[in-house]
Image: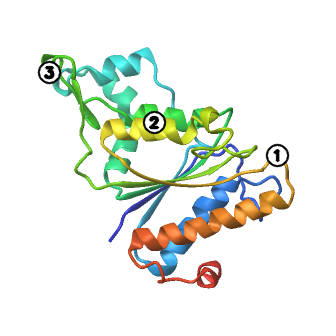
Amino acid sequence: MTKILHIDASARPGRSGIDPHGSHTRRLSAYFIERWRASRPHDPVDYLDVGQSPPANVTGRWIHAAFTPLAAREPWMHEVLAESDRLVDQLIASDLIVVGLPMYNFSAPAQFKAYIDNIVRVGRTFGFDRSRGDVPYWPLLGDAGKRVVLLGSRGDFGYDKGQRMAHMNHTEASVRTALGYIGITEVHEAAVEYDEFGDERLAQSIDQAERAVDELVGRLIGAPEAISRADALAA
């Protein structure tokens, strides 16, 4: 059984193709889950919408509490860290993390950055010990076998590696860096482009992204031929 954590980070509440001005990333992440469940209907899915209900931003009190040893924490520290603890527990309990992650001004949305800041936690997802010298940090989730799927959208085009705008794409790279820091290094990606153009290139890009999801779900399940695209859409 694979435990899935499905996260949406778009500020848009609906899905493209269904709702006016709906989100492409919500469309892709929902499609991924539909595809997965068509083959493995009993795998549990936990849903988190940080786009509509973002976690609280890190504060000075949060940092003070997080870097205070557990046994020495005062009651207010536990209260400050309660949301972060829930998010870390949810992440640790998951095997596959599927994220609808749009590009906002060349990077991840602030809502998702708040999520990252809450789950990169000293003593919970990374270790810290000054006695280790120049390398006092180490990941704590490296042996957990977690996998991540980042499903993006971009207004312009050419943001993938080797393309004309790749140097301006800090979205997936920033998330890969943060997750790698805590030990999650298997990350897969697919994205829609041309949103701001709204022409046939956008439609083609959506189709290509959904086909990439088809292939990715089959590969992650270990049975590329397990489900047809028509089966997924009918599920």
Dots 2, 3 in contact, CB < 8 A: no
Tell me the SS state at disc 3: helix
The CA distance from mark 2 to mark 1 is: 27 Å
Which of the two residues, 75 or 4, is positioned nearer the viewer here?
A: 4
Secondary structure found at label 1: loop
Which residue shows up at 49% across the image and 35% down it?
174
**Nearer mark to the viewer, of 2 and 3:** 3
Residue 55 visible to the viewer:
no
Q: Which mark is residue 132?
A: 3
- Percent x, y for residue 29? 58, 60
The residue carrying mark 2 is 116
Task: Give the distance between the C-alpha atoms of the residues marked 2 and 3, in whole angstroms.
Answer: 25 Å
Residue in front for this viewpoint, 183 or 124? 183
Residue at horizontal 34 percent and vertical 46 percent from the top? 184
Amino acid identity at mark 1: Glu
What's under tag 2, amino acid-wise?
Ile
* Residue 147 shows in this picture: yes
Residue at 79% x, 63% y: name it. Answer: 203
Q: In this view, does 115 lie above or below 65?
A: below
Examine the rendered structure and indicate whether residue 226 appears above or below residue 2. Answer: below
* SS at circle 2: helix
Q: Height in image: 55 above or below 61?
A: below
Mark with earlier residue (2, 1) = 2
